[in-house]
Amino acid sequence: MKAIVISAHGGPEVLTVTELPDPVAATGEVLIRVKAFGLNHAEAYMRSGAWGQVAAVPGIECAGLVEADPSGELPVGTKVVAILGGMGRTRNGSYAELVTVPATNVVAVDSPLPWADLAAVPEVYATAYSALHGNLALKAGETLLVRGATSSLGQAAVNLAVHHGATVLATTRNPAHTPLLKELGASDVLIDDGGLASEVERRGLSVDALLDIVGNTVLRDSLGTVGPRGRVCQIGFLGGFSPVADFDPIADLPSGVQLSFFGSAFVLGTAAFPLSDVPLDEIYAQVEAGSLRARPTRIFRFDEIVEAHRVMEAGQALGKMAVVLD
C-alpha cells in the first residue's frame, strides 16, 4: 500500500510517500480502506518530534470502507469513520491507503456526504462534544467562552454550543477573523491579548463555562475569566506545551471554580469514554442540512501532504482541512 511516513523529525518536508506492506486486522481490530483523512495539529506535533517517539505513519482519523473485520460485526464495504485508538501515536495511522484500528474506535456512519466532508468531522466534533457535555455539562441558556475559537476544534465547539442553545463568546488574536466567528453564531468576539479576565470584567460580561484550546500559557487568566462556580475545561495547547510555572491551587484556583481536562487522544473509544456517547450520525445530518458548518475549508490530494502541513502550520486554513485518496 501507499503510505506517508515521517522520515525524520522536522518540518513538513519530512513527510514522504512510500510503499509499505498491507496491514492485517488482528482480533479486536478493523481494517479500513481509507478514502479521506482530516488534518490535525496533533499530527504536526508528532511529525516535529514534540511528542517524542511515535509511529512511522501519522494520522489520527479517517473515513473509508471496511476491508476486513475479524469479528464479523462490520460487513466488508461498510462506510465508517475511525478516530484515535493510538493511530499515529502507538500504531501506524491513517495517512495511508489501509489502516487497522481498534474496533472500539470505529463507527459505522449513514451519511451521503462526500468523503472529505466525512473525514473533517470525527476528531474535532467528538472532542468538542465530549468536553462541552461531559466536562462542562453545558446547558442551554448559559454563556460559554471558547478560547482559541478560530482553530478547527474551536469552530466545532462554537458550532455545537450555539446549536445547543448556549450564548457563545469567541476569542481570536486577529480582528480580521471576527466575521468568521460571527457567521458561526458567536454573539460577541473578543480579541485575545492574554488578558481576557480584565476584558470580560470591563465589559460586564458573565461567563458560566470556558473551553480553553490555547492551554497552559493562559490557564491562570482563563480561571479568572469565569464567574463564581464557573467551569473551565482545557482541551488544547495552541500556546505551547510548557507547564504552568509555580501553579498553586490555593492561590491560582478561585474558590468554587471547577477546572478539568479532556485528552481525547488518550481516552476516546475506551470503556469510560465510548464513541457511542457522541451522536456522530446526528452531527453528520446537521452538517448535511447546513445547520452545522463543518465542511473542509481546503481539500488536498495524497501527494500534496507537505503543502497541506505547511498551510496548517501557517494558520492559513481557518477551519478543518482534509486529504482525499484517489
Image (tube, rainbow, N blue to C red):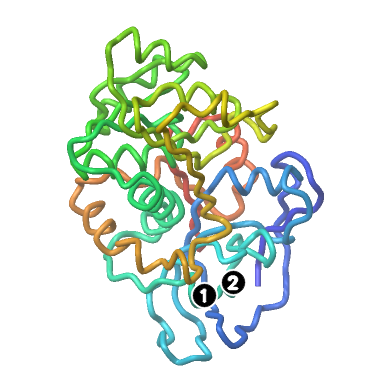
Element class at badge 1: strand
35, above or below 304, in the image? below
Q: Is residue 268 left or right of residue 305?
A: left
Q: Horizontal and vertical percent for residue 92? A: 67, 66
Q: Residues within 10 Å of mark 1 (few under 14, many from 20)?
A: many
Element class at badge 2: strand
For the N terminus, the quadrant is bottom right
188, above or below 215, in the image? above
Mark 2 is on which residue type? Val
User: In the image, what residue occupies the spot 30% across and 60% down?
Assistant: 113
Q: Is residue 160 left or right of residue 130?
A: left
Residue of label 1: 32
Q: Horizontal and vertical percent for residue 74? A: 41, 85
Q: Are marks 1 and 2 in contact (CB under 8 Å)?
A: yes
Residue of label 2: 99
Residue closest to the eye, 115 or 99: 99
Residue closest to the eye, 110 or 103: 103
User: In the image, what residue occupies the spot 40% across and 40% down?
Assistant: 297
Q: What is the number of callouts on the image?
A: 2
